[in-house]
Amino acid sequence: MIADGDEDAFRELYDRIWKRVYFYLFRILKEKEAAEDVMVETFSEVWKSASRFKGRSRSTTWILGIARNLAMNYLKKERHTEDIGEYQNRLPVESLSVEDCDRRDIIRRAFLALSTKHREILDLVFYQELTYPEIAEMLNIPLNTVKTRVFYAKGELKKILNEMGVERDVI
């Protein structure tokens, strides 16, 4: 048990989810080095705080919550802003020829063009496969707010894909 200082258990947990945590952080921070740094901080915090994990949620949800908090702290420090809600401006969208990219690349480019808030909520739903109640608990927001954010984020993603010249049946 990690809470008892079992290094083998910690190593097994790390090996099982480090990629998931890293890509979650990368999609929020959009910088490889920042994602790596925050990931190290995340697992350090997991090791130190394991005894405080109460088991009310899945361990991955708890770890992603730690990663998110550390990522938000990083963004505040680097960008001198208050919270994720202030990162509304998204990147300019470049028009693409479908022949130039595969589906995964198209989705990645469109995803990175989303605002941080929309990118995060879709990441938690589609990449992390968390339930809406788990997301609500992790972000400390009402369930209906999660539903609303997902709705608007999907709409924004669709708009970006349209701006890129990607037709619905291509994806």
Image (cartoon, rainbow, N blue to C red):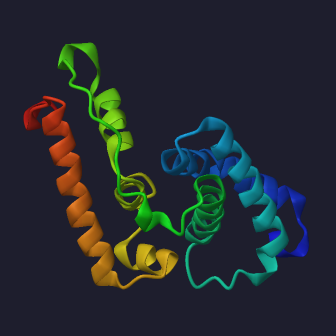
Q: 8 or 156: nearer the eye?
A: 156
The image shows residue 46, relative to residue 91, as above or below, that is: below
* Residue 126 place in picture, x, y as percent: 36, 54
Q: 119 or 83: nearer the eye?
A: 83
State which quarter of the image contains the C terminus. Answer: top left
Residue at the image point whose x is 29% and y is 22% from the top = 102
Q: Is residue 1 visible?
A: no
Q: How many marks?
A: 0
Residue at the image point whose x is 61% and y is 72% from the top = 62
State which quarter of the image contains the N terminus. Answer: bottom right
* Residue 134 place in picture, x, y as percent: 45, 76
Specify the quadrant of the image occupied by residue 149.
bottom left
* Residue 143 place in picture, x, y as percent: 33, 82
Residue at the image point whose x is 65% and y is 57% from the top = 74
> Left or right: where does residue 52 sit relative to residue 145?
right
Q: Is residue 42 visible?
A: yes
Residue at the image point whose x is 26% and y is 27% from the top = 94
Q: 90 or 27: nearer the eye?
A: 90
* Residue 113 place in picture, x, y as percent: 34, 41
Specify the quadrant of the image occupied by residue 23.
top right
> Left or right: where does residue 39 sit relative to residue 124?
right
Specify the quadrant of the image occupied by residue 51.
bottom right
Outermost residue, top side: 99
> Left or right: where does residue 84 sit relative to residue 62?
left
